[in-house]
Image: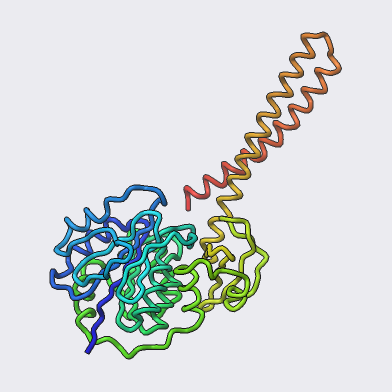
């Protein structure tokens, strides 16, 4: 009988240490292809494959577009590429960011759910926010096993905790025991194939073939929202997924509600910093004009310029104080 021959792993903050500990304990004869997405800067060079190759007995390398998902090997998503699985073939994609990330955990998980549902195991490790939760739910709905790092064991507990809130995991485990657990699950017979829900298939198709994106496709997934996409400014559609909201625009950018809120907060801070700089510059220019009027013995004009400069300074101080409160709250939180 077929067994679980695909292990898809997603992690974010704290992931390097977690992955090293995990792969160090995997057996050299693991009869499954291991696919790894760690969120990283989109253009950053990564030496993650070399680190994982040295950490344990399984060879590791960047996934190659069109290459096979080889059992007994770790395939790592390269920077600025989504990693997808189609059949037994690895695919790399420049499709739109998901949760502001490329590569995206959810994108990998969803593609594995569609092609290999009951043969696969989805693993969520340490990280911020709720990346991986929607993808793990898609895997579970397609018959896969769901494994989540114990939040108490995770360096950053957000991702495991949110995954457990959205998915009824088959196993919750600390890193020390997870390699033995995964080896046992890989050897176990796969479940019966499960029909792929049409909305999961459509979202996987959107990331695999971006030209299908459009209003008609998104209208089948959800309803138009009042929010605009932080990446492109387009209209976003609201999707209901396991009692939680997600958002997707017609160009393919996708966000969980938490990630969308985080992106919006970044936009607000950027706008406030831009306004602060503009107000300070305007105030300094008006003071210069006031000094020039003084030099030219124009006291009335000098007073008007100075009063306007002080008004801009007061407005700048309001924004500066608000920014300081926000940054302090982030540090304390």
The residue positioned 80% from the left and 9% from the top of the image is 296
Instruction: Report which quarter residue 64 is drawn in.
Output: bottom left
Q: Nearer the viewer, residue 149 or 182?
A: 182
Of 273 and 212, the residue lying toward us = 212
- Name the spot of residue 22 as percent of width and height, x first: 23, 64
- Residue 327: image location, x then y, percent: 53, 45
Q: In the picture shown, does residue 39 fall above or below 33?
A: above
Find residue 131 and report its horizontal and vertical position in percent: 43, 65
Answer left or right for 33 relative to 195: left
As drawn, is 139 to the left or to the right of 247?
Answer: left
Q: Residue furthest right?
A: 300
- 179 above or below 81? below
Q: Name which residue lies at 42% across and 83% down.
A: 141
Q: Where's residue 113, x and y in %? A: 38, 78
The quadrant where residue 114 appears:
bottom left
Type of colouring: rainbow
Q: Is residue 240 above or below residue 79?
A: below
Label total for image: 0
Of residues 233 and 66, the one nearer the viewer is: 66
Q: Residue at x 62, y 45 (%)?
A: 271
What quarter of the picture does the N terminus occupy?
bottom left
């Amino acid at each position: 009988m077929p067994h679980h021959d695909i292990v898809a792993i997603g992690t974010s903050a704290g992931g390097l240490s977690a992955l090293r500990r995990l792969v160090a304990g995997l057996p050299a004869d693991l009869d499954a292809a291991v696919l790894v997405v760690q969120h990283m800067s989109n253009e950053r060079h990564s030496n993650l494959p070399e680190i994982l190759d040295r950490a344990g007995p399984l060879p590791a390398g960047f996934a190659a577009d069109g290459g096979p998902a080889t059992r007994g090997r770790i395939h790592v998503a390269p920077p600025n590429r989504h990693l997808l699985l189609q059949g037994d073939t690895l695919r790399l994609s420049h499709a739109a960011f998901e949760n502001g990330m490329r590569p995206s955990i959810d994108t990998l998980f969803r593609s594995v759910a569609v092609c290999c549902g009951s043969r696969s195991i989805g693993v969520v490790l340490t990280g911020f926010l709720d990346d991986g939760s929607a993808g793990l739910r898609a895997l579970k709905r397609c018959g896969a096993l769901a494994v989540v790092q114990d939040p108490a064991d995770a360096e950053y507990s957000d991702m495991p905790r949110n995954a457990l809130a959205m998915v009824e995991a088959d196993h919750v485990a600390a890193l020390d025991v997870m390699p033995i657990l995964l080896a046992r699950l890989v050897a176990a017979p796969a479940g019966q194939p499960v029909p792929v829900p049409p909305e999961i298939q459509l979202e996987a198709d959107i990331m695999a073939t971006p030209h299908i994106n459009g209003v008609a496709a998104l209208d089948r997934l959800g309803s138009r929202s009042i929010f605009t996409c932080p990446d492109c400014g387009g209209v976003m559609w609201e999707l209901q997924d396991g009692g939680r909201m997600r958002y997707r625009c017609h160009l393919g950018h996708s966000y969980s509600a938490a990630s969308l809120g985080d992106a919006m907060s970044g936009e607000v801070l950027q706008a406030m910093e831009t306004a602060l700089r503009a107000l300070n510059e305007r105030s300094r220019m008006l003071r210069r004009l006031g000094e020039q009027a003084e030099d030219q013995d124009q006291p009335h004009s000098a007073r008007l310029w100075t009063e306007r400069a002080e008004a801009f300074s007061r407005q700048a101080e309001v924004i500066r104080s608000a920014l300081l409160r926000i940054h302090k709250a982030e540090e304390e939180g």
